[in-house]
Image (cartoon, rainbow, N blue to C red):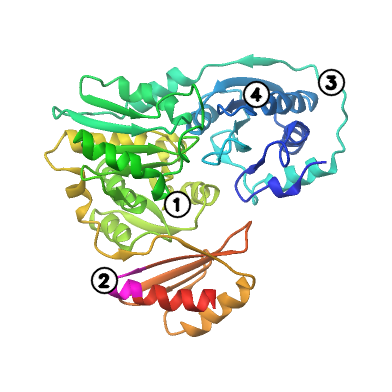
Amino acid sequence: MVNPSIFKAYDIRGLYPSEIDASAAYAIGHALVDHFQSKVVAIGRDARESSPELFAELSRGIIDAGAEVIDLGLLTTPMVYFAAWNIDNASAVISVTASHNPPQYNGIKIALRGAVPVGENSGLLAIRDLALADGFSKTPGTGSVTTYNIKPDYYTFIEGFAHLGDRKLKVVIDTANAMGVLELPIFQKFADKLDLVYLYGSLDHPFSAHEANPLNTATLAELQAKVVEEKADIGVAFDGDADRIGFVDERGEIIPMDLITGLLAQEALRKNPGATVLYDLRSSKAVKEVIEEHGGRAVECKVGHANIKKQMREEHAVFAGELSGHYYFQENSYAEAGSLPAILLLNLLSNGDQKLSQLVQDLRRYSHSGEINSEVKNKNEILQTLRKRYADGKQHELDGLKVEYPHWWFNVRTSNTEPLLRLNLEADTPELMAEKQAELLAIIRG
């Protein structure tokens, strides 16, 4: 029996084997083909101990449903997305991964041809319902499993964005013994221009280091210390499947991920004057301001990669950034591109004389709370209270409730899977931010 709780808003994820197991993988593979009528499905996987079994059962379900399987081997999720628009006969791709979750978890991310994501509003719920019904004929299929090595093409693609100048840089990269290790050859290609220092740069004992999650700033402590110790120019941290990335400046200070959106947007607009750039609605006002100051069209968007990739296509956006460290590129079929944000920042640093802290200083215009989670039982009642309490502000509900005032704003969103409200707020000064944060949390937490 497939556990319905493993189906999330944007992917499938749970504890192995108590929540996600071989039988679930088989049912999901079969259901994917049944729903999308896929003919060929390419599958990459992370290095968790459970990934080979889930890959095998996914493949069996896909083949029994009448499709073929391409085994991509061990890959980062961005490599799988790259495969989605570079393997001509693949009509769908799967990444077997639980991202930054601990090794006892595993999961499945699905995309269609062109790296179009499959989420709750684009087929994932239909796959769930078919998998739960378990009405599959168990007649063995006649399809086959072939192998394909996408990594060389992916490396060449990312390396093509590198335009490093004469300034040699020292770079500390923390891959947390997770899948970002497979991204390292990109940086090693430029060993004459980059002095590379690694933290947890091996897959010998995968997912054995700290949590591979740069959004959790506590996980960056070792990287911060190493950057200072090495007198490095930049620190880079990958999450577990390398579709998110975080940065530390030369002083060991963490750069908020939305401010990286602002920096990278400037680069995108130099190449594409007047283009559209998306930023998620939790981002600092400074991001919108910088996009517009550089001649771009700034468009606010909902949180979540499936929402953002869809809106990028609709708006013909060249770039999008998310507070969680996802960065999306039109050149990569609107998907995350792993190491590309780092390469673009290295271009900026190596072709100029400014330090990373100086490059980002102009974006530090306001005081942002970061995302604050509160466990509550009555989410809808609290949202209604906030609507009434802040009725004098400019309100919209693109994603949760956002209320804007001349000198501060806040957004409150509900979790899709937990009894949580997520608060983000920003103000012109740290004092006003602290005052409004206390005021809002008093209402939310009672």
Q: Is residue 400 left or right of residue 257?
A: right
Q: Position of residue 190 (x, y in %)?
A: 26, 21
Q: Is residue 217 above or below residue 95?
A: below
Q: Label 4: few (<14), some or many (≥20) within 10 Å?
A: some
Residue 213 in which image quadrant: top left
Mark on residue 429? 2
- Tell me if label 3 and label 2 are in contact, CB under 8 Å: no
Which of labels 1 and 2 is toward the front?
A: 2
Between discs 3 and 1, the one toward the N terminus: 3
Q: Earlier in the sequence, mark 3 or mark 2?
A: 3
**Quadrant of the image containing the C terminus:** bottom right
Which label sits on residue 315?
A: 1
Gap between marks 2 and 4, in whole Å? 51 Å
Residues at circles 3 and 4 in contact by the CB criterion of under 8 Å: no
Query: Which residue in the structure is indicated by mark 4?
Result: 52
Q: Going from the N terminus, do you reach mark 3 or mark 4 first?
A: 4
Q: Amino acid at mark 3?
A: Pro
Q: Which mark is on residue 140?
A: 3
Instruction: Work out whether residue 341 can be spotted.
Output: no
